[in-house]
Image: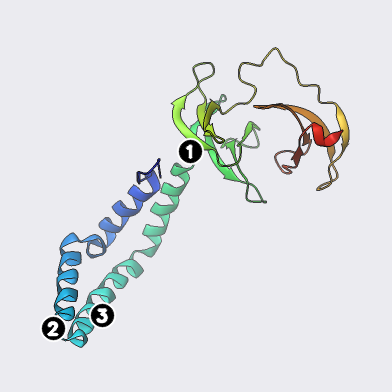
Amino acid sequence: MEGKKIKVNVLGEQLIDTLVKYSQKITSEELTREFETKLENIQKGKTQKENIIEEYKTEISSILDDIEENKLKIGQELYKAYRESMIVGECKCGKNLILISSRQGNPFVGCSGYPECKNTYSLPRGATILKTKCEECGLPMISFGKPRQRACLDPKCGKEDQEPSNEVVGECPECGSELIKRSGRFGEFIGCKGFPKCRYTRSIEENV
């Protein structure tokens, strides 16, 4: 969804293309219109529903046979499309930046070249990755918050001269690693040194 508009993403487009390639009937507009007409005839009492059910059992069986026969190829193409749909930009190392879900289910952006490249970028809750690129560093822009704000994917962008203190302030209650002061889009905060494996954070005020 973009506002009130429904927008088909890359994965959705590939899903339709793959189904058309291996089972044209499942996306047939003609078959859909025919089915809707026959349903209307049933409601009007012009057609017996038993006859229609038997007819479409045959059609559905044919569609399922097509899918079963080509399920390996369909799966491979959809998995490839899924991987491509996760690409959000180019990493500074030249590899792809991809959307990843942590073990806790929290999304973040990381490099496809891991472990050689360990670049990662956290995402604020409810953030949307935009196609617009940052004028400063070329990384994607993100939209987040209420009201919506825009910022570079890299929270350090434009803050290169501001060195984070990395002051140790305690122990992470979730994994036992050190808690340190970090710098983010909203200023300093407390975060786990084990990021991105552990994503525990709290505000500076909560640490007082």
* Furthest residue in direction top, as rendered: 161
- Dots 2 and 1: beta carbons under 8 Å? no
Q: Quadrant of the C terminus?
A: top right
From the viewer's perspective, is 5 left or right of 113?
left
Is 179 left or right of 132, judged from the image as shown? Answer: right
Alpha carbon distance from label 1 to label 3: 40 Å
Q: Earlier in the sequence, mark 3 or mark 2?
A: 2
Report the residue marked by disc 1.
Answer: 87
Q: Nearer the viewer, mark 3 or mark 2?
A: 2
Secondary structure under badge 3? Answer: helix
- Type of the residue with mark 2: Thr
Q: How many marks?
A: 3
Q: Please state which amino acid type lies under the numbered disc 1.
A: Ile
Pointer 3 residue:
57
Who comes first in sequence, dot 2 or dot 1?
2
Above-or-below relation of 15 to 93: below
* Label 2 to label 1: alpha-carbon separation: 50 Å
Q: Which mark is residue 47?
A: 2
- Residues under labels 3 and 2: Cα distance? 16 Å
The amino acid on which the numbered mark 3 sits, given as a three-letter code, is Lys
Report if residue 62 is visible in the image.
Answer: yes
- Give left or right: position of 133 versus 170: left
Q: Depth check: 42 or 18 in front?
A: 42
Helix, strand, or loop for circle 1?
Answer: strand
Indicate the position of residue 181 as horizontal and vertical percent values. 80, 28
